[in-house]
């Protein structure tokens, strides 16, 4: 007959010693941080550097504003923003030379043509706004 091996017996845990001779390890807490280490210092504000006032420092010149550009005005030949005698004379020269003045530029009366009526309209506008 064959021998049947017995199953090993489970190992039972041994109970902890409750003897007074066994001393507990002392409980230690980590040391509290020192107050100086725990509070970070706020950065000091940077004081602005005063501007130099000696003669060796040149100031940057301010840029000039762009020139005022007026919308084109019909009949304003010299583009000075008003209708004046120079404009009337320029239109008159165009008419007398035999060229056909451009109505998009000269038609002050808005009749579709640049003619003597526009010369008179320019002169009348000049009289009202000298």
Image (spheres, rainbow, N blue to C red):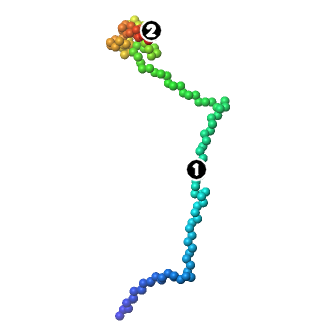
* Secondary structure found at label 2: helix
Q: Residue at x 37, y 16 (%)?
A: 104
Report the disc number at residue 42: 1
Residue 114, above or below 42: above
Tally the marks: 2
Q: Residue at x 61, y 30 (%)?
A: 59
The answer to whether one can see residue 64 in this image is yes
Residue 123, above or below 32: above
Which residue in the protein does label 2 denote? Answer: 85
What percent of the width, then of the height, locates residue 92? 41, 7
**Identity of the residue furthest to the top in this view:** 96
Residue 58, above or below 13: above
What percent of the width, then of the height, locates residue 9? 42, 86
**Label 2: how many Cα within 10 Å (few below 14, some 14–19, many 20+):** some
Q: Is residue 114 left or right of residue 26?
A: left
The answer to whether one can see residue 87 in this image is no
Quadrant position of residue 31: bottom right
Q: Nearer the viewer, residue 114 or 33?
A: 33
**Identity of the residue furthest to the left in this view:** 111
Quadrant position of residue 93: top left
Quadrant position of residue 45: top right
What percent of the width, then of the height, locates residue 12? 44, 83
Residue 58, above or below 115: below
In the rendered structure, which disc, 2 or 1, sits on the residue that comes first in sequence?
1
Q: CA distance from mark 2 to mark 1?
A: 74 Å
What percent of the width, then of the height, locates residue 26? 57, 73
Q: Residue at x 53, y 25 (%)?
A: 64
Q: Quadrant of the N terminus?
A: bottom left
Q: Nearer the viewer, residue 94 or 17?
A: 17
Q: Residue at x 47, y 22 (%)?
A: 68
């Amino acid at each position: 007959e064959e021998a049947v091996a017995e199953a090993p017996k489970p190992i039972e845990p041994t109970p902890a010693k409750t003897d007074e001779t066994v001393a507990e390890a002392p409980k230690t807490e980590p040391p509290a941080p020192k107050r100086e280490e725990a509070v970070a210092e706020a950065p000091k504000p940077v004081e602005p550097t005063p501007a130099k006032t000696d003669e060796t420092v040149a100031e940057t010149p301010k840029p000039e504003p762009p020139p005022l550009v007026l919308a084109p005005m019909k009949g304003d030949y010299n583009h000075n923003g008003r209708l004046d005698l120079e404009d009337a004379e320029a239109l008159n020269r165009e008419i007398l030379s035999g060229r056909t003045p451009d109505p998009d530029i000269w038609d002050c009366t808005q009749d579709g043509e640049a003619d003597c009526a526009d010369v008179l309209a320019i002169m009348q506008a000049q009289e009202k706004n000298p």
